[in-house]
Image: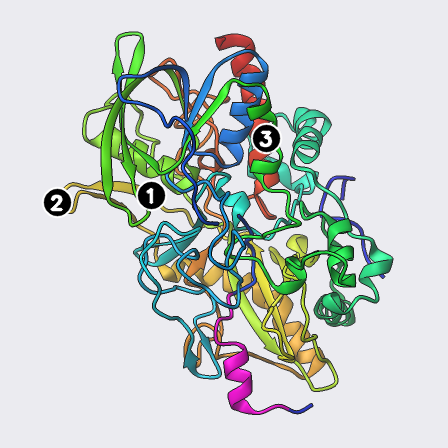
Amino acid sequence: MNDNTVGSNASSGFSRRAFIVGTGSILGAAALSGQASAAPVPAPISSGAHVPVLVIGTGYGGSVAALRLTQAGVDVHMVEMGMAWDTPGTDGKIFANTKTPDYRSYWLRTRTKQPLSNFLGFPIDKDVPRYTGILDAEDFSGITVYQGRGVGGGSLVNGGMAVTPRRENFGAILPTVNPDEMYNTYYPRANAGLGVNNIDQSWWETVDCYQYSRVGRKHAQRSGFPFVFVPNVYDMQYMKQESAGSVPKSAVDGELLYGNNYGKKTLPKTYLAQAKATGRLAISPLHKVTSVQRDGASYTVVIEQINTTGDTVATKVVTADRVFFAAGSVGTSKLLTKLKANGALPGLNGEVGKGWGDNGNVMCGRANHLWDPTGAVQSSIPTAGIDNWAAGGAFAEVAPLPTGIETFASFYLSITKNPNRAEFSWNASADRVDLNWQTAWKQPAIDMAKSIFDKINAKEGTIYRTDLFGVYKTWGDHLTYHPLGGVVLNKATDNYGRLHGYSGLYVIDGALIPGNTSVNPFVTITALAERNIDKIIATDF
């Protein structure tokens, strides 16, 4: 692996009821992390406003665009469907704990939809008030897509694993992009901008909160698989302090899927903070773009302002000289698919909506022997994985299961070389965008993950857990944390994200990447955005 990649090789009793109660709010610690309770941002965009640049979404791609444009002297306004997570709730914290989801946890749902839906045969979801919470579990035919909602997008709810792909895999990820410029310039720039750092491996070897990961290493290496450490955007020095009890706990307290209150370097602390410091950035949370249409040399944009229960409280019409679509793979793809179909942007080409993939995500758990406890205290920030990409098409993140009690279980999120791709389409009769993914398309991902875990189970004499994703269900094949594609680079756009047929319209997020990155995708999304905005500023501004 190159220097920026996944890393280097690393050398009782309890009652059944207590176990269930202790895990009653488990969430698949699998791959997300974040920021929670809303405060109104000063001066949201007003109807009739004209802005030089409007950025739709505040995730990785949009934040890169906002920073580089404002640094270049361009005024930027960002609109974000979710909230600005900057005000504590009644418990004094901005974000809810992974183990106790509440109104802050889910986007406009009345019942939680936890990635791990069951434990020991019991369902663990619960009713919650409808609220513009931080995690969206968006259901399509055949798949649920987990996405971050709020200023900072996916950075709020992912596990922070900041992985640069192996260079030898890059040609399959972005075949029309020069790997030299990515690995020499834009991956390093992205890692610096995101605040990527590495765990102290000597500390990792002894601290209680990574016992689960050390068990994962032992089992991987005994079966002959490479075990690799992975960089992260969590502040590893802060984690040392919280583990020692000298600062408020966050990762060590299991905070993950519903935001992270202290140690994680999310986009509001990195790219967006720098962009705001220029004095040229404004952000309007709880604003959702519903239409973009060309109007002479500029674009007319219709925006709905919503409240925290999802009701529309105002409809605004603004104009923008240039518009960047950065609403995430699903949000950008859905919006452009709709605008092409309903005639607002009829000149978009036939590639819009195509090439969507799930990054090969599939989850599983293993039941370990009593002599292999994984620890009652588990950091929610994953730091390592099993790399069988070359031989079996899978990279398996050794993920936490932060229940607060001993589970004797190992849990994994696998990223696989699943070749299946889906397409978004406009459903006029239902007034919505559909995705034609089929659950059966997960089978290649399962087979690739089995190339690791069947062998480990055979070596260790262990079995798969079948109580995490339903009743007698082994594989978490119903979801993805890593949506990619839908507006693929150099197909639906040119080779820098300019939408064909419309000068001044750009895509700059994960929708550009055709379905797979071989690792956790946000560093690649960030680096590609850095590359593209460099070119766009140089030639279009």
Q: Which mark is residue 423?
A: 1
The picture places residue 55, in percent across and down from the top left corner, at: 42, 26
What amino acid type should be assigned to the residue bearing mark 2? Ser
Residue 50, percent from left and from top: 33, 14
Marking on residue 429: 2
Name the residue type under label 1: Glu
- Coloring applied to the structure: rainbow
Cα–Cα gap, marks 2 and 1: 18 Å
**In the image, residue 21 lies in the stretch drawn in magenta:** yes
Task: Mark yes or no: residue 325 visible.
Answer: no
Viewed as shown, does residue 381 lie left or right of 422?
right
Q: CA distance from mark 2 to mark 3?
A: 43 Å
Relative image position of residue 119 (x, y in whole percent): 48, 79
Q: Position of residue 155 (x, y in %)?
A: 55, 44
Q: Nearer the viewer, residue 153 or 456?
A: 153
Q: Tag 2, which secondary structure?
A: loop
Are the residues flagged by discs 2 and 3 in contact, CB closer than 8 Å?
no
Q: Is residue 463 above or below residue 453?
A: below
Question: Residue at 80% of width from left, 66% of height from top?
Answer: 207
Task: Say which amino acid is labelled 3.
Answer: Ala
> What is the quadrant of residue 351 in the picture?
top left
Between label 2 and label 3, give the one nearer the viewer: 3
| Marks 2 and 3, the one that precedes in the sequence | 3
Which residue is denoted by mark 3 in the rendering?
A: 273
Q: Where are the magenta residues, as a range?
A: 14-27
Query: In percent of the image, x 49 and y 79: which residue is there?
Result: 466
Reply above or below: 483 against 242: above
Q: Residues within 10 Å of mark 3 (few under 14, many from 20)?
A: some
Number of residues whose C-alpha sits closer than 10 Å to that of mark 1, classed few (under 14), some (14–19) or many (20 or more): many
Q: Are marks 1 and 3 in contact (CB under 8 Å)?
A: no
Q: Is residue 276 above or below residue 261?
A: above
| Residue 133 position (above or below residue 325) | below
